[in-house]
Image (tube, rainbow, N blue to C red):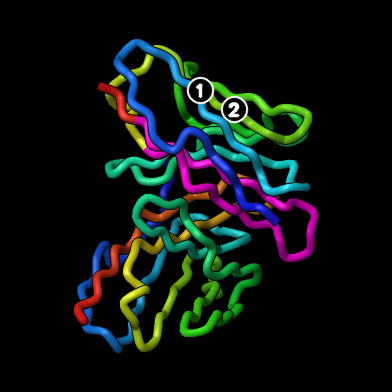
Amino acid sequence: KAGVTQTPRYLIKTRGQQVTLSCSPISGHRSVSWYQQTPGQGLQFLFEYFSETQRNKGNFPGRFSGRQFSNSRSEMNVSTLELGDSALYLCASNGQGYSGANVLTFGAGSRLTVL
Amino acid sequence: GQQLNQSPQSMFIQEGEDVSMNCTSSSIFNTWLWYKQDPGEGPVLLIALYKAGELTSNGRLTAQFGTTRKDSFLNISASIPSDVGIYFCAGRFQGAQKLVFGQGTRLTINP
């Protein structure tokens, strides 16, 4: 099976811009979660999608949003970027429903730098 | 946000030494997971624990799900250079998909 694919791997934006990150989960996985990783706050949960529906949401402002498509691919969007949004954004897919597989498999992440 | 208390934050050891790290929480978790993250990559799952008291090994790695369900530890025996990286514990509440992560243990090995 191919792993979790995230694009782009690196990107640089300026304050006030918006950004869209993409994630393709492992084939057959229907749950996709997003996490933000920063040196100060560590790994923080953003949201989780299952069958195109947001099931859970972390404690982030409304500038952070996401969606999931019928093929389980997911995107997350951050609008009106702030310096503090600089982070590694990690996507993880979950083989929910498979015996012993209710764990998250992470992609390599998209590193966002906001200038 | 809610986080686990992971310790130590960093370790500097000699190659061949054994390593121990642990996570504690004030909350009860249904699942404990241990991940390793290399520079520029996402976390990779090392061990998953599903039952209180469970002791699971993966090669030189051994992890245990604490009996109180509020803690877990990871041991690495006979460390080698490729063990260098950041190790994260993560807990999941029953019925939830969200993981709560520890702050990580950065392992450095002197050859």
Secondary element under disc 1, as helix, strand or loop, is strand
Name the spot of residue B55 as percent of width and height, x first. 57, 81
Q: Quadrant of the C terminus of chain B?
A: bottom left
Q: What residue would you read off at disc 1?
A: A20
Name the spot of residue A18 as percent of width and height, x first. 43, 15
Check disc 1: other Cα within 10 Å, few if <14, some if 14-19, many if 20+.
Answer: few
Question: How many tags in the picture?
Answer: 2
Q: Is residue A94 magenta?
A: yes
Q: Considering only vertical position in the picture, is A54 above or below B25? A: above
- Residue drawn 61% across and 78% down? B54
- The span picked out in magenta is A88-112
- Residue drawn 74% across and 47% down? A27
- Residue A57 appears in which quarter of the rendering? top right
Is residue A19 toward the left or the right of residue A25 in the image? left
Q: Considering only vertical position in the picture, is A31 above or below A21? A: below
Q: What residue would you read off at disc 2?
A: A75
Which comes before the other along the chain, label 1 or label 2?
Answer: 1
Give the residue type at disc 2. Answer: Glu
Is residue A21 toward the left or the right of residue A102 in the image? left
**Residue B80 or residue A10, whichever sits in front:** A10
Check the residue under mark 2 and report the chain it is in.
A
Secondary element under disc 2, as helix, strand or loop, is strand
Give the residue type at disc 1. Answer: Thr
* Badge 1 vs badge 2, beta-carbon distance below 8 Å: yes
Name the spot of residue A93 as percent of width and height, x first. 64, 46
Q: Is residue B77 magenta?
A: no
